[in-house]
Image (tube, helix red, strand yellow):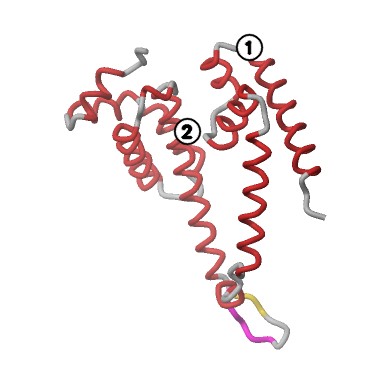
Amino acid sequence: MKFQLQDVVEMAKRGNKDAAEEVIDRVKPLIYSAVRRYISRWDKDDLYQEACLTVMECIRDFDPQKGVPFLTYVKKKVNFRLFNASRCRRLVLSLEQRFTVEEGEGRTLEEMLVGTEPGVEEQILLRMEKKRLYDAIEKLSPKQKRVILMHFFEGLKYKDIARMGKNHYKSVLRLKDRALSSLRKNLEYDRPK
């Protein structure tokens, strides 16, 4: 399957720096669009550099055999990376903020949260819940499972899933609705009493 920029991406993947620069130049509008979303929280140049690094990682990791278009792959990765970076930055700032405790002494949120990691019991319960979810997903039809995995685990949009499976958008939404309904029933039925 031939995709847009295939030749250039393949050359960049083999180490051709000019090809890598050309890929970045060709996806600049996508990069700037993503940068504009997070500009208020970060320096524009930092965001641009972060996005370019992500594009380079996309070139290295892209597998055309998975059927995801390169530009869709890059867009998802860049948006997720910038969102995650901005979220982490907000978290760091809020951890440094001082709060007044009942006795009147000021403590940072970080100091207040020390030692709140999940214990062994919580980790076991979390693992059990994950297993229940995966078991419930295994009970779905192959088409329903594909839609759930591609959307919720791989982050693809429904229209991209429809295009890749050569289905109508509405049929993908109906598959998703039936799958979620089945998951709810299976998870409720399997809930330990």
Residue carrying label 1: 168
Left/right of residue 75 with respect to residue 152 in the rendered view:
left
Which residue type carries mark 2?
Lys
**Horizontal side, residue 25 vs residue 173: left or right:** left
What percent of the width, then of the height, locates residue 133? Answer: 66, 43
Residue 48 is situated, as x and y percent measured from the top left of the image, at 36, 41
Q: Quadrant of the rendered structure where residue 67 is?
A: top left
State the CA–CA distance, disc 2 to disc 1.
22 Å
Segment tinted magenta in the rendering = 104-108
Q: Main secondary structure of the magenta part?
A: strand
Which quarter of the figure is the C terminus placed in? bottom right
Query: Which corner quadrant of the image does residue 184 belong to?
Result: top right
The residue sitting at 68% across, 81% down in the picture is: 101
Position above or below: 151 against 2: below
Residue at which label 2 appears = 76
Secondary structure of the residue carrying numbered label 2: helix
